[in-house]
Image (spheres, coloured by chain):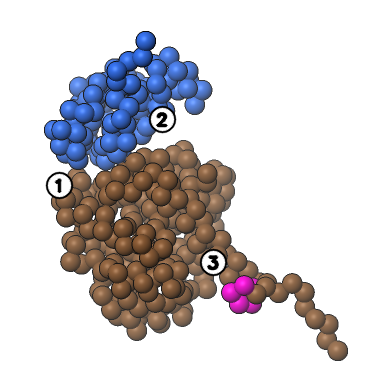
Amino acid sequence: MKFVDLHLCLPIGDAERAERLIAKSAELGYSRIGVPLPPSVKEETVKPLRQISTELGLDFVTRLDLNPRSSGDLLVCLRKFRRSFEVVSVTCNSKAVARHAARDRRVDLLCFPSVEPRKRFFDRAEAQLASESSAALEVNVAQILSSIEAKSNVAFLSRLRREVAIAKSFDVPVVFSSGTSELLFLRKPQDCAALALLFDVESSFALEALSTNPTAIIERNRARQSLDYAAPGVRIVKEARKP
Amino acid sequence: MTRLVRRRYLALKIDCEGLFEARAVSDAVWGAVLRLFGEVGAGQAGLYLIRCDDKTRLAVLRCWHKALPMVRASIASITKIGNTPAAVHVLRVSGTLKALARKTTSV
């Protein structure tokens, strides 16, 4: 089973620390890492990170974290940046943004940063929209670890249990990722799966959330970005000769 | 003769910035189990730190096999040993210490 950490926050300006984080991910058993990059990032900034990852046997995936203030803002960002990144995640800080992100086919991951249950908007209506557009629910392990450390885990874990149960019932894929830039907050895939026990998720489901689900997102987007892609399910096999 | 309670032995790798004592590791594991699963859970885990080496940063922990998922979740939730930031990774799990030693050396 090939494991994917779709949210490894690398410090872009600090090459040494970024290298240590990538090496640690490889050591822990991941084979692909998704790295959030700023929208205006240049290729020469990404190239060394990609090279380090390749040397350590990791597949480097570019990711964009959008943090829109309104649904209009989200639309503008998606139109502008979608094609430049392999994975697009939307941080849902309001209900309007969450609903719009769940409805839009260009969004891959829905992220809810707040630990406070009232500020997390993944309910049945959101799941219904996400299931129709193939967006996935992202759960960050760093968020769980921080909440346990801060002893504010009871309400958060209860809410997370509910969200994952809703996602399951609507066939919304769930993705577990580290979501950290701290070395000591990185965990092995099997340990992340073990942590999922805290919100009543069985081990097989958790391992899927660390391998099959993120892999499917990456493969789908890479196929879309390839030159022979025409439309969903349609690929250019051969170009016709001009008469 | 089979044992009434089967045991599992876990080889742990401790990532920590400074030095640590075996007692602190044991306290961190017990603290994590107590925090997440309470006194009943901790009582059902049958935890015992068999050895802990601060040079190799390896430790061996014993628990009851039915409590293994609970213990693994607790170990993954550890972020501090004493007051030092730390992470504990499970390297291998085995039913006997002999097999664990064999599996750990092959890593």
Decide if residue A44 is in sight here.
Answer: no
Looking at the image, residue A104 sits to the left or right of residue B78; the answer is right
Number of marks drawn: 3
Which element type, helix, strand or loop, lies under badge 3?
Answer: helix
Quadrant of res A70:
bottom left
Please say whether residue A232 is one of the residues in the magenta stretch: yes
Query: Residue placed at 26% from the left, 46% from the top?
Result: A198
Tell me the chain of label 1.
Answer: A
Quadrant of res B86:
top left
In the rendered image, the vertical position of residue A137 relative to residue B30, given as above or below: below
| Crowd tier of the residue under label 1, counting other residues whose Cα lies within 10 Å: few below 14, some 14–19, many 20 or above | few
Looking at the image, residue A35 sits to the left or right of residue B34; the answer is right
In the rendered structure, the colour chosen for chain B is: blue
Query: Residue placed at 42% from the left, 77% from the top?
Result: A104
Quadrant of res A135:
bottom left
Which element type, helix, strand or loop, lies under badge 2?
Answer: strand
**Magenta span dominant secondary structure:** strand
Query: Can you name the residue that lies furthest to the top here?
Result: B1
In the rendered image, the vertical position of residue B51 relative to residue A150, given as above or below: above
Q: Residue A221, labelled with which disc?
A: 3
In the rendered structure, the colour chosen for chain A is: brown
Q: Which residue corresponds to mark 1?
A: A151
Q: Position of residue A23 (x, y in %)?
A: 46, 42
Query: Can you name the residue that lies furthest to the bottom here?
Result: A243
Tell me the chain of label 3.
Answer: A
Amino acid marked by disc 3: Asn
Q: CA distance from mark 1 to mark 3?
A: 38 Å
| Crowd tier of the residue under label 3, counting other residues whose Cα lies within 10 Å: few below 14, some 14–19, many 20 or above | some
Amino acid marked by disc 2: Leu
In the rendered image, the vertical position of residue A78 relative to residue B31, given as above or below: below
Which range is magenta? A229-233
Q: Which residue corresponds to mark 2?
A: B91
